Image: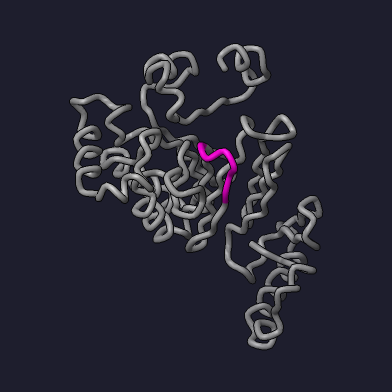
Amino acid sequence: MVEITEKSLTKDLKLVSVLGNHDMAVTREVFKQKMNFGEDDYYKVELPRNWVLLCLDTTDMNPRYVDENSKAWKEGHAWLASKTEEFKKRNAKPWSGGIASVQFNWLKEQVDLAEKEGKKVIVCSHNALAPGSAREGMVAWNADVISSYFESKSETVKVCVAGHDHPGGYIQRGNVHYVTIEAMLEADCGTSYGYLEVYEHECILRGVGACKSRRMRTSEWGRFTGIANFGMLTGDIDVIDSNDPEEEKLANWINDQLRTPSSASSSSDDSDDLIIRR
């Protein structure tokens, strides 16, 4: 991985990584050093146009992967002790982990800050963060608690991207999209990766190889932002100059029409033929 990174174009780009179970095979410290991690195991990246990327560590809380003198180690043991053997067999796989209290408090602080500043959040992690977004036993140990929090902040937290579970997965819960990217390791076509295009009104995952493409709305229906998508083809995006007074009048008129009862009652599953969305 280090050799590939050094030979690639990533030297001209910003490379961000998240910690996963296989990284622990070379120890946390060695992986972080080789991959040019910062001091912290989880961190924030400011993105353009009022978006924020939060990179989490889901090896946290697993006693196998954290220092035995840490608070996370104690919390992990306590969490495991509180579960039945049947539950642990299904859901607490030894190669997973979760988000312990120190990291969770940091996460809440970052989401609250983004909410205050009017920004939207994308979350990246190794393990999926919501039940149903990956197979049983492949999500973070406390995914139910994490996803419940995200869904209470769905005006701010929009998309969560994960790996770990090789077949991939997806679920939308409480207006938050949870995507598990299909792994290269088991890709019949030899590769699997994607590009995430981020707009004010939606995020588009353009998959390559085994990675499935997905179109994920990040704002409510019936709000016009100056971007109109015609049809379901993700390439059909027309950007309108919202600084033009005449176009601003048009936008206001469209929003007025969308708010009327008649337009709301006429909506159907086929309404994507013409979608004007924030």
Magenta range: 164-169
Residue at figure coordinates x 71%, y 66% from the top left: 276
Which quadrant of the figure contains the C terminus?
A: bottom right
275 w.r.t. 59: above or below? below
Please tell me whether residue 127 is drawn above or below residue 39 in the rendered image. Answer: below
Which of the 4 image quadrants contains residue 184?
A: top right
* 260 relative position to 115: left or right: right
**Residue 114 among those drawn in magenta:** no
Report whether 257 appears left or right of 231.
left
The picture places residue 204, in percent across and down from the top left corner, at 67, 49
Q: Residue at x 43, y 14 (%)?
A: 33
Depth check: give the residue in front, 219 or 242.
219
Q: Between 148 and 74, which is closer to the camera in this rendering? A: 74
Q: Nearer the viewer, residue 78 or 4?
A: 78
Q: Quadrant of residue 223?
A: bottom right
Percent of width and height locating residue 146: 37, 51
Percent coordinates x, y for residue 237 in the rendering:
78, 54
Q: Is residue 238 found left or right of 265 in the rendered image?
A: right
Q: Quadrant of residue 225?
A: bottom right
Q: Main secondary structure of the magenta part?
A: loop
Residue drawn at x 70%, y 39% is 210
Residue at left offset 37%, top offset 22%: 39
Percent of width and height locating residue 70: 21, 29
Q: How many marks?
A: 0
State the quadrant of the N terminus: top right
